[in-house]
Image: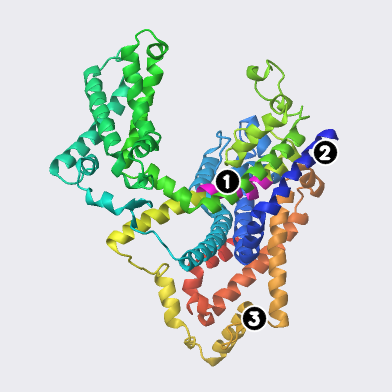
Amino acid sequence: GTTVVSVFRLCRIFRFERYTKAFDYFDDVILLSADVLTMTGFTALVLWVFFSSALYITERDNPDPEMQEYYKTVPHAMWVTLLNLSGECPLCNYTLLGKILTGIIGLFATALFGIPIGILGAGFEELIDNSTEDTLDEEVHIDTAQPQQLGSSSIVPGGGVTNDHEGNSSMGLESRLYKFMNGEGSQAAVIFEILIYVLIILTVFIGILQTVEGMENTLHVVEWIAVIIFTFEYIMRFISSTKDPQFTYIRNPTLRRLRYVFSFYSIIDLVAIVPFYLAVALPGSWVDQHDEFLRMLRLLRLLKLDKYVPSISLIDDVFRLKSQALTVTCFAAGILWIVFSGLLYATEYKDTINAIDEVPIYGCDENCTQVDRFRTYFDSAVYTCIHLTGDYPIIEYTAWARVVCFVMVIAAVGIVAIPSGVVASGFAEIVQTRVKSQCGEQKGAAGDDWYEWRLAELEGQDPPKSRFGPTMDLWQTNVNEFLNGIVNPHTGETIWNCGSSFFRIFMMTLIISNVIAVLVESVPEVDRFVGNDPNNFFDVFESVSIFFFTLEYMLRLFSAPKNLEALYSSWVYATTFFGIVDFLSTA
């Protein structure tokens, strides 16, 4: 009881919501996207049930006892299938058909299953962006209302202010040196920049090669030359840093150079070259004894390439662009991590049923169970963090723990994944903006396939006349209106009469009942209770279902020449997705 109470105390963290309003955004997203989330969520549910049933059929007689245990009923199969659809595949000893099904899940179903999560992330980001734009508009309005008085100063590209007398000496030694170090002003500057580029890649390759046994001193001379050139480059950049636009807000040249020394790229340059000199100057010292470790710091030279091929700076731009969205989503993700860590701990800290392999690091050498993994809340936090990333290296959970994991897969993983989606979206946005500014924006229409074109052509046209005369036209029209309703030409609203509404509800109920019957029939206790005698309950129910599914399919095939969505063609209906599904339902 004390543990449960302790877990509930973690809910106090939600009091921060008063200040961050993080979950208010999610509430707004769900309300705004309710219709789409309902449709896509139902699609995800259908995929989950379908693949659970299919894997139950293929794996229930698997020679591997572990596989049999996880797929002995459809409800049991739904646990592992849920993980499969989330992108995780903790089991591997599938039969041939099982491997084909899990391959289909990995290639196609996972993407469809993730659509609701994508919609949630996109809607959340849109709300945050709109909020940010409103804030920025207010700030711009305030700024423009303030008169700017800078005297004889001027704004520089780096965002700082510089005096006019400095501009008069802009072509001095330091300015020319700054341009040279950045590949501007002459052919020699371009060549020097390319040389630095090549040396960075070469020294990184040498650093990797020297980790191989027997090749510790390979190309040591090249490393010497490269370090000398990097040292020369650093000194030149230090001298010319007074002309770097990002430091021009500092008036004192000495302070500008000091600011450069503590800048990101300066620290990277120093870390890449200073250990080399210390190892040479102090043989036998701590630096020399840990030379292998310090050599790995040479890999940081890769970050120097950002001067030439923007990458780290691009990520920095993304974090600045999406700072508000990232703050809110990271806060929400942190809250969920804390809460679900407590819930998983509360459901597993007494789990002595599920055995695990020996874990000496936990002090367990034999007869280990989940208790040994979930000794404290902090142990649970580690596994919860892994699960929230979508990875499930552990699946031996109790029923209540599986419920917690189910919520994590469906809801929490989507929310925790939003920050990475926000970063990816911001990255693409910045890159596309830069490309469009160079190449111009080209617009194209999406989804203009043959069906869309043909549907647009037939819009507003009357269905073709039947070759069998007006009586056949009347029958087909009446059946089509019974199945698909009557569309009001003025409002576009679909009107259903009592008979068609009853038939729709009946068919929906029949479909849901069939799904439930498949799930229940896989449970051995239920199967034994019903029995396997001919004409048992499940056999009769299946016969009734097939009769009505066949009747509906034949009626839709018959009335398709009067159905616009079938392009007034029975063949189009029969060969499209819904026609094929209706046909397979009769099997």
Q: Residue furthest left?
A: 187
- Look at mark 3 in the image and give the residue it sits on: 482
Give the SS element for disc 2.
Answer: helix
Q: CA distance from mark 1 to mark 2?
A: 31 Å
Q: What is the quadrant of residue 35 in the picture?
A: bottom right
Q: Please name the residue shown 58% across and 65% down the image.
A: 582
Marking on residue 5: 2
Is 222 inside the magenta-drawn segment?
no
Pick whichever, 578 or 422, lies toward us.
422
Is label 3 or label 2 in front? 2
Rendered location of residue 74, percent (x, y): 68, 46
| Residue 212 image point, x, y percent | 34, 17
Percent x, y for residue 527?
A: 76, 46
Q: Residue at x 73, y 37 (%)?
A: 342
Q: Is residue 515 above or below residue 66?
A: below
The quarter of the rendered structure image containing the C terminus is bottom right
Which segment is the magenta one?
407-420
Query: Mark 2: which amino acid?
Result: Val
Q: Is residue 37 above or below residue 552?
A: above
Q: Which residue is mark 1?
A: 86
**Closer to the eye: label 3 or 1:** 1
- Image coordinates for residue 279, horizontal then vertical, percent: 34, 14
